[in-house]
């Protein structure tokens, strides 16, 4: 059941910028704010982690500001907050190991060799850089971009960049693993 909630949450999160853009001319912002309430509620239902619960509360706050002011601009800041939350989640594990990438790697391979621990720390640093840049671009589009530019970046291009980054990391990881294992016998 938790897996289904996560899939639904991910799908709705992917659709969020597109929905805000497409419905922005048809609905008052206070009605669009309900989309953030829905995302926040689903996030709370899908997790017990305080960081994600905090993001849900921030979504509720953005929805409340949108509802009170009946202005759409607070809705555009949700992707920035998602990136900031991910940066925080990954970043904190650099000071309180194991790193996030190591934690995820150990789900599949509990006995990681030392070189893999070093590599996963580097991957965590790289993801922190990604979230910093991606969140910065999301902030630029939220503050100064047109509705269309904001939706295009946050509803499409940002997700494509996540996929490219993850795919590139996968290819690098395979190469690192082959080198660590040595020449084939």
Image (cartoon, helix red, strand yellow):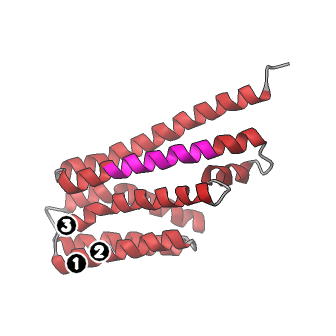
Crowd class of label 1 (few under 14; some 14 to 19; many from 20; radius 10 Å): some
Do the residues bearing badges 3 and 2 touch, measured as CB atoms within 8 Å? no
| Label ID, residue 72 | 3
Asked if residue 99 lies left or right of residue 56, the reply is right
The residue pinned by badge 2 equals 63
Q: Is residue 66 above or below residue 138?
A: below
Residue 55 location in percent, x, y?
43, 69
Residue visible at 51% across and 75% down in the picture = 45
Residue contact at pointers 2 and 1, CB within 8 angstroms? yes
Q: Are marks 3 and 1 in contact (CB under 8 Å)?
A: no
**Majority secondary structure in the magenta region:** helix
How crowded is the residue under tag 3: few (<14 C-alpha within 10 Å), some, or many (20+)? many
Of helix, strand and loop, which one carries label 1? helix
Q: Position of residue 14 (x, y in %)?
A: 39, 55
State which quarter of the image contains the C terminus: top right
Q: Quadrant of the N terminus?
A: bottom right
Q: Crowdedness of circle 2 by 10 Å Cα count: few (<14), some, many (20+)?
A: many
Viewer-side residue, 46 vs 114: 114
Q: Residue at x 47, y 62 (%)?
A: 8
Residue linked to disc 1? 67
Range covered by the magenta-colored residues? 121-136
Q: Residue furthest front?
A: 95
Pick the front one: 113 or 28? 113
Do we see residue 42 in this rendering?
no
What residue lies at 51% left-to-right and 59% top-to-bottom?
7
Q: Residue furthest right?
A: 185
- Is residue 68 at least partly visible in the picture? yes
């Amino acid at each position: 059941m938790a897996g289904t909630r996560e899939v639904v949450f991910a799908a709705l999160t992917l659709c969020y910028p597109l929905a805000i853009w497409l419905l922005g001319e048809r609905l008052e912002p206070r009605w669009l704010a309900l989309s953030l309430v829905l995302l926040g509620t689903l996030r709370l239902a899908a997790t017990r982690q305080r960081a994600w619960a905090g993001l849900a509360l921030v979504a509720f706050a953005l929805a409340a500001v949108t509802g009170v002011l009946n202005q759409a601009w607070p809705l555009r800041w949700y992707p920035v907050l998602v990136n900031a939350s991910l940066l925080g989640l990954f970043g904190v594990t650099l000071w309180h190991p194991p790193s996030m990438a190591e934690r995820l790697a150990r789900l599949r391979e509990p006995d990681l060799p030392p070189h893999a621990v070093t590599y996963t720390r580097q991957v965590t640093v790289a993801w922190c850089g990604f979230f910093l840049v991606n969140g910065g671009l999301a902030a630029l589009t939220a503050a100064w971009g047109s509705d269309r530019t904001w939706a295009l970046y946050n509803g499409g291009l940002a997700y494509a960049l996540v996929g490219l980054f993850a795919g590139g990391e996968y290819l690098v990881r395979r190469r690192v693993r082959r080198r660590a294992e040595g020449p084939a016998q």
